[in-house]
Image (cartoon, helix red, strand yellow):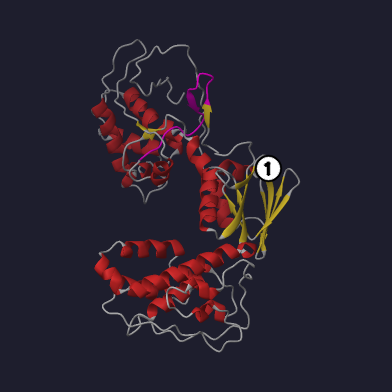
Amino acid sequence: SPEQAAGGEVTVASDLYSLGLVLAELFDPPPVNKAPPKAPKALKAAPLPPDTPPPHSLSTETGVDGSWLKSLENQPALPKPVAPKLTPLPKELKALAAELLQDDPQLRPSASQVAQRLQTWLDRPARRRRQALWAVLAVVVVLLVATALASMRGPNKEQVIVVGAGLSGLAAARELEDHGCCEVTVLEAQERVGGRIYTMKTPAGSILEASSQYHSGRRSSSLTPLIKKIGMKREAFTATQDSWDIDGTRTPVSQEDWDRFYSDTTGKARTLEDQPEVSLESMIEMMAADGEFSYLDNDREIGYCISALFENDHASDAGDNRAWGIWEGDELVGRDEWFPEGMSAITDHLAEGLDIRLNTPVTEVHYDEEGVTIKTATGEEFIGDRAIITVSLGVLQGGDIQFKPPLPKKNSDAINRLGMGLMNKVWLVFPEVFWDEDVNFMGYLSDPPGQ
């Protein structure tokens, strides 16, 4: 491959390049004209373990000359495999070969993407598959070699340190671990994983969500495939709006009023994207002055809608929120849902099999072009090629982690500029249910609102 010719390491991407060369032999004319790369002085692949089968044993049944699997060292050029010119051949294979022969290894499809595309092709009618049987056998050989080489390169894998075992950190670590490209270590300050996902249980076995409580937009959320894979039990949040005054008198704020207020305000907010300085409070005051909430009787009812729909979700006053930002969540498609067995199942699943160091608060991150050194409150040091920092905004703003050198100004400015609301959550456990069990939420709005 081009990177090998330049003296670089043999990677899975290099193996996939060789797959592209094999596939290209099936086409006349070839999909891409590639000159054979010059042989490198030495390959940097890890040596084969003693029990590795010789290369020719991988291709005995295929009729493919095993010599193309040999090292390129001291060879004038790559041996050229001989293959029949089969016609007609599926255009999918021709397109795949062209993509695999990209000079830049980062532009080539990954091994998993190649496998998926081949599986799609193999699912076609048998008649077409037989016409390119040689290609299938060659593909199997090369993928076996790619897998074997990938498993042999453990000592050469990059060392990646993930700071924080919340949802972001665990998702990043899980992705890297599953692709087998890195050795991953996760450092977590607390005695548990999950971050702001934390399911507790009462002595009676009921679950209490200490933080995140439900999942929004099941049809568009990136979490939905993972939730389905885990097989988590889900129940829909259904909500209708009824309200009473403090003396028990039912107020006229109906479900239709509630929905209309939300639609009107988010619709207006969409028009203010180029006016980021306008607050949610200012926008609603302007709308009220223009009579756009005539279906609500008084300012208290407007305040109730503001508090229940926006201030509660953002855990901050309407005056502290920019108007144009409130409609973003409106793009989540699908119902909201909760998990009777607890949300921690999500992060527990992601954490399974990872190297996670609990009770290990990070205090310093030293980084340069050579890599990173991370120091912890326990006195340990972790050295890696890269680090992924997934701690919360509060930790970053509090300066609990010192970056050396300091983060670039654009990053530190963004950290200091962003705000985050504060909400206190208290669970009350009663000996018996005295409320309507069909009710999901009960809210109380004080005067003044926000308390």
> Most extreme residue toward the bottom, as rendered?
76
Amino acid type, label 1 = Thr
- Of residue 114 and residue 316, the one placed in the foreground of this image is 114
Image coordinates of residue 286 in percent, x first then y, are 32, 37
**Magenta stretch bounds:** 201-217
Rendered image quadrant of residue 32:
bottom left
Tell me what residue is drawn at x 26 percent, y 20 percent.
252
Kind of element beneath mark 1: loop
**Is residue 125 covered in magenta?**
no
Q: Is residue 212 magenta?
A: yes
Q: Residue at x 47, y 11 (%)?
A: 431
Crowdedness near tag 1: few (<14), some (14–19) or many (≥20) residues, C-alpha within 10 Å = many
Please tell me whether residue 103 is drawn above or below residue 319 in the rendered image: below
* Residue at mark 1: 360
Looking at the rendering, which quadrant does residue 340 occupy? top left
**Picture coordinates of residue 368 (x, y %)?**
66, 62
Decide if residue 248 is on the left or right side of residue 294: right
- Residue 252 falls left or right of residue 332: left
At horizontal 51% and vertical 26% (from top left) the residue drawn is 425
